[in-house]
Amino acid sequence: MEEFEVEALVIEKLDIGEGDRIITLFEKNRGKIKVLIKGIRKSKNREVYATDPLVLGIYKLRKKSEMYYNTSLQLKNPFLKIKNNFFKLEISIYILRLIDKIIFENIEAKKIYKLSLNALIYIEETDDKNKILIMLSYYFYKIIVYEGLKPEIKGKSYFNLREGIFEDEKKQYSISLDDREYEYIQKLNKVDIAGINELKFDNKEILKIINILESYLNQNLFLELNILKYLGEEKWI
């Protein structure tokens, strides 16, 4: 019977029976882990909050056959500043959904774990919506790179969503880019966040960039991500 301790992010929960809960953890060495926690919903202990989504915790786990069970848990970061702000919360839930779709069970994901945790910490500590959206565009681009889908540059007028090529010829899966959009994405490619800030994109313009990157990931990984669905009405932008 394997026993071990992990720091992990809760990305999903499912209540079963009268008091049990299955949580999905995201952990750097094992990717997604589904854990059964017996009787947790009947507990009055503060640590019950370590089974809620968008929480970082320390979990002692025991593996029996193909199932993981929790033997103890400790709340490390509840991300309260995110949960008390609608905009931050929606962006963070979107990140959790993205993680859930691209990470596999029991597969190492150290780079994406570190990237995701840093993104959530940044969201918690930052109140400027523009800076949060810029960070999200950077996060999305890095996910694309880590998934082995880094775009190829052969031009600048169109981005081919099927082939992942910036080119000057329009094809079936191409979307047009203006010079500023192209420049923004190239600065993402160079991790030039200071340069992006100098471009002074407004929130809707940054969302368009995120939509382009999102469409590329959707096309190649057969996902159905939609950032606008999480942000709701435009007044939040």
Image (cartoon, helix red, strand yellow):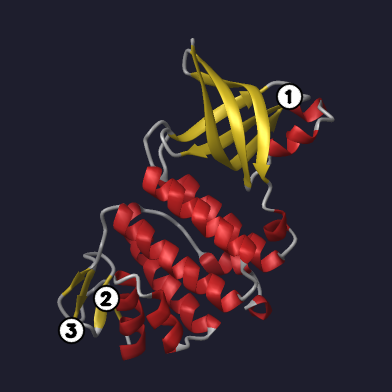
Quarter holding the C terminus? bottom right
Q: With 214 as the anchor, is 131 left or right in this view?
A: right
Circle 3: residue type: Asp
Occupied quadrant, residue 130:
bottom right
Name the residue: 50% across, 32% down. 33
Residue 42, x across and y down, in percent: 82, 26
Q: CB under 8 Å between callouts 2 and 1?
A: no
Picture coordinates of residue 4 (x, y %)?
51, 21
Work out how far the residue at label 3 is from the one at label 1, CA to CA, in angstroms. 58 Å
Classify 123 as above or below 75: below
In the image, is residue 232 above or below residue 112?
A: below
Disc 2 target residue = 159
Q: Amino acid at mark 2?
A: Phe
Relative height, residue 163 to residue 7 (above, below): below
Q: Mark 1: which amino acid?
A: Gly
The one of 140 and 131 positioned closer to us in this rendering: 131
Residue designated by label 1? 17
